[in-house]
Image: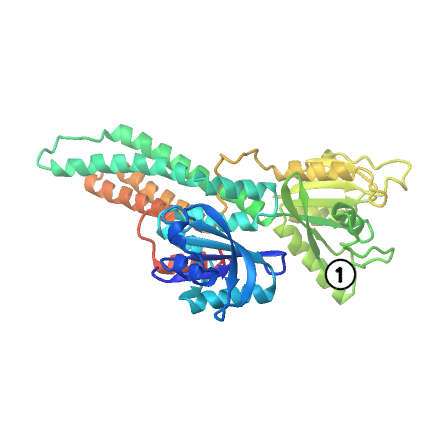
Amino acid sequence: MTDTICALATANGGALGIIRVSGKRALGAVGNICKLNFDNLEANTIHYSHIFSDNDEIIDEAMVSVFRAPHSYTGEDCIEISCHGSHYILNKVLELLVQNGCRMANPGEYTMRAYLNGKMDLSQAEAVADLIASSNKATHRLAMSQLRGGISSELSQLREQLLHLTSLLELELDFSDHEDLEFADRSELLELAKTIDKHITKLARSFETGQALKQGIPVTIVGKTNVGKSTLLNQLLHEDRAIVSDIHGTTRDTIEDTIDIQGVTFRFIDTAGIRQTTDEIELIGIERTYAAIDKARIVLWMIDAEPSQSELQVIQEHCNDKSLIIIENKIDKSKDNIQLSSSFFDIPSETVLHISAKYGTNIDKVEQAIFQAANIPAFNSSDVIVNNVRHYDALIRAHESLLQVLEGMGQQLPGDLLAEDLRQTLNILSEITGGQITPQETLNNIFSHFCVGK
């Protein structure tokens, strides 16, 4: 990390652009192009300056923010140049910085330096990318919780308990000539190991919710042709996203879009109508409908009359493990609602709703039912929900390692073997926060997904 790096930290096309410079030569490089003497400038201050080309032509006016090591984002000397957002100006400033000893930063290199310099642990560094990518209230809360050290704090407590157990077992080895001497009471050790394993398992189980919040909860709209599926999708999206027609079989492929309901993203999939047909293209669309149902977490089954046995059979076959919401549409055309109850269906059903997709009647009730069916636990920024695949994988391996410890206790294995399995669990949990030496390949893989400038 001896290089001094520079990069544009804001998106192109705005009124202003911020260029970030970090490293041992940051003060000198920026001082050369701004003609500022940083020896006389205090840390954490902002200064008005001009930016000069190599022939003393003024390129732009700028505000220069000064951060000195170790009190900066990266832990190094760091300068942020705020200038006008002209593509020419920004490229020219970067060109001048390179001429003065900087190099262009790689994706995520600033945050990687922050991690390597001890400004944050690895899970917090990953939270930076999640925070930038957050698209709703729920994903923002998850990212903020992790950035503030939520998962780090949880794991730190577990590691301290495991380390205490390991230390007691290893202490016994120092007195191995006293066979009857036990520093770690085996019954207490067993109960504590079980408690830690339950906590790890709870964190791992939260991954399903975390991934759903991060990627959006999949909702599939199904039903026979011309029942109003596309009209409902358009009402939920508040735009004409899907083609609506009285002609049967208009939708021949799945149509996807997302909406935000009470701070949570839902991915809606409008599907081809289920019916008997000989049209090869429509048949392909119906097969894709079945595939969409299988991938969904919530299914909206739309009807406008008592369903046929074949349609009921399809729903029964594909929706046994789904949250099913039955929606009777076109109540504006019917004098007598179908008034089907959940007992009519031999399948799990949360509710039966009666709507007019054409006129938007009771659409708010549909949204409310969808949110309730998602069964998202109430949480705030202090709660820990795992949404990172790498963290989930480590938790699963830590659980398996602890199972070996518990099995070893049941077999009354000696303390040195138990201590080895406990050390393995400690090392696995340390992978999440980067508490032990993390392979460069892992770091490169994590930070390569960051945007340049972060």
Disc 1 crowd, CA 10 A, few/some/many (<14, 14-19, 20+): some
Q: Is 145 positioned to the left or the right of 413 in the image? A: right
Furthest residue toward bottom = 55
Q: Amino acid at mark 1?
A: Arg
Q: Position of residue 23 (x, y in %)?
A: 38, 57
Q: Quadrant of residue 377?
A: top right
Name the residue rendered at 47%, 42% in the picture: 146
Provide residue 349's location: percent of width, then percent of height. 68, 37
* Residue at the farthest left position: 177
Quadrant housing the N terminus: bottom left
Report the residue at 40% width, 57% height from top: 27
Q: Nearer the viewer, residue 67 or 174?
A: 67
Which residue is nearer to you in this view: 404 or 440?
Answer: 440
Whole-percent x, y for residue 337 in the image: 85, 36
Front residue of 439 and 351: 439
- Quadrant for residue 380, please give it: top right
Q: Is residue 388 above or below residue 162?
A: below
Q: Is residue 10 visible?
A: no
> Secondary structure beneath disc 1?
loop
Q: Residue at x 38, y 39 (%)?
A: 155
| Residue topped by disc 1 | 252
Q: How many marks?
A: 1
Residue 126 can be seen in this image? yes
x, y (%) of residue 81? 50, 56
Quarter-of-image position of residue 159: top left
Compared across the picture, whether 167 is left or right of 229 comes to left
Give the left or right position of residue 26, taking residue 308 as reference.
left
**Please, which colouring scheme is shown?**
rainbow
